[in-house]
Image (cartoon, rainbow, N blue to C red):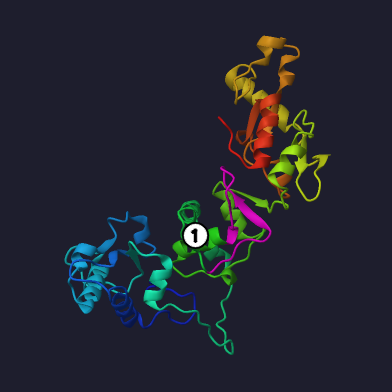
Amino acid sequence: MHSRGGATGGRPARNTEYEEALLTIIRRLRAQDTGTNSTIGRVLLDSTVARHSSKVARTLATSDELTGLPDEDVAKLIRQRAKRWGQKLNSKGGNSTKALRFEISGRSLSSIRTTLKLMKWSVEEASPTIIERLPSDQLRKVARDHIRRSIERILAGEDVPNFSESTDYDVLLPDGTRLAPKKVFGLALEEALGIEAFPQHFSSGFSQPCFEIIQAAGFHIVGKPSESLSSEAMQQALRDIPLDDGDRSAIEGNPKIVVHIQRERASGLSRQKKAAFVREHGELFCERCGFRPVSTYGPYVGDSCIEVHHALIQVKDMVPGHETKLEDLQCLCANCHRVTHREMALGIAANS
């Protein structure tokens, strides 16, 4: 349940009938309760500030406390505790109309929707609310920790209803998960500014604060992958790709796979990585299987068995201007390099 009022970014006040809505929700959820059970498992404070605390710390009421109480007393108890939450002892004031989250146990989503009598509705578009783009100095109040917490919340299943899925670019996480950049930034913006964020508040793109701040937080933004083949077709096609020194990759598409030389690699980057690796470890070896080629083939040709692999993002997925750091690269033997690329193409995790 949304809070009443609060910072709205210049838009009309929200949820002005908070008290009536809260009591209505409580009455409908508890309509079939008996004296010994409560449909509401617990009520949590769900404000931006409260989300930084554990669920236990932000619990306002539990089922044991609510069982047997009249609906009006339940609403009163919740509001009183919301008002006092986070206040110092003997302090006055406070807000009793904060955002709330109800936890319901033993009920399906469709059952809860029916009980609450939820319905779809729309507003006449004769006089739409105009949401202006926020200035850059406001957008740049989003910090690294805001982005990281936003990603954690999305991965935990939190919805970002004001933002749709991405169409051109994704935030690519180390495990291969892709998230919509505007969802990530929008949720972070809400925390940073204390507002409800909308797509009109900011623009996306590599020249915009949205992408710059996400990348500065340590996350890669890549283009959408092309339409993939079936699993059987992919495996058959991959058997025919002659990967050698790591300078070749596959463009995946339908109906065929085209092999081509990637021209976008930074010249000398592989040599720099190998030199740095030798300075740190004394010799080249495969970071995946531990193979040390110099021991087998000697110092003159052994190093040729080690190739440099882009561990976080393949070259074909990079956007113009992508910056690769040496720590983003791995030294792999030819066998492990080929296996790793096949795993990445098939979307499976490495064995080590």
Residue at 76% in and 28% down: 245
**Is residue 88 something one can see in this rendering?**
no
Note whether 210 is above or below 241 in the view shown.
Answer: below
Note whether 277 is above or below 51 in the view shown.
Answer: above
Question: For the residue marked with disc 1, what is the amino acid?
Answer: Ala
**Along the viewing direction, whichever of 311 and 147 lies nearer the viewer:** 311
- Give the class, few, some or many, for how many residues have Cα within 10 Å of label 1's Cα (few <14, many ≥20): many
Classify residue 326 as left or right of residue 85.
Answer: right
Residue at 49% in and 56% down: 154
Instruction: Give the overall secondary structure of the magenta segment.
Output: loop
Residue 193 position within the rendered picture, expressed as x and y whole percent measured from the top left: 46, 65
Q: Which residues are magenta?
A: 162-182
Classify residue 221 as left or right of residue 78.
Answer: right
| Quarter containing the N terminus | bottom left
Classify residue 263 as left or right of residue 165.
Answer: right
| Quarter containing the C terminus | top right
**In the rendered image, which quarter is residue 111 located in?**
bottom left
Secondary structure category for the residue under label 1: helix
Q: Residue furthest bottom?
A: 126
Classify residue 65 as left or right of residue 221.
Answer: left
Q: Which residue is mark 1?
A: 188
**Is residue 178 something one can see in this rendering?**
yes
Residue 338 position within the rendered picture, expressed as x and y whole percent measured from the top left: 70, 30
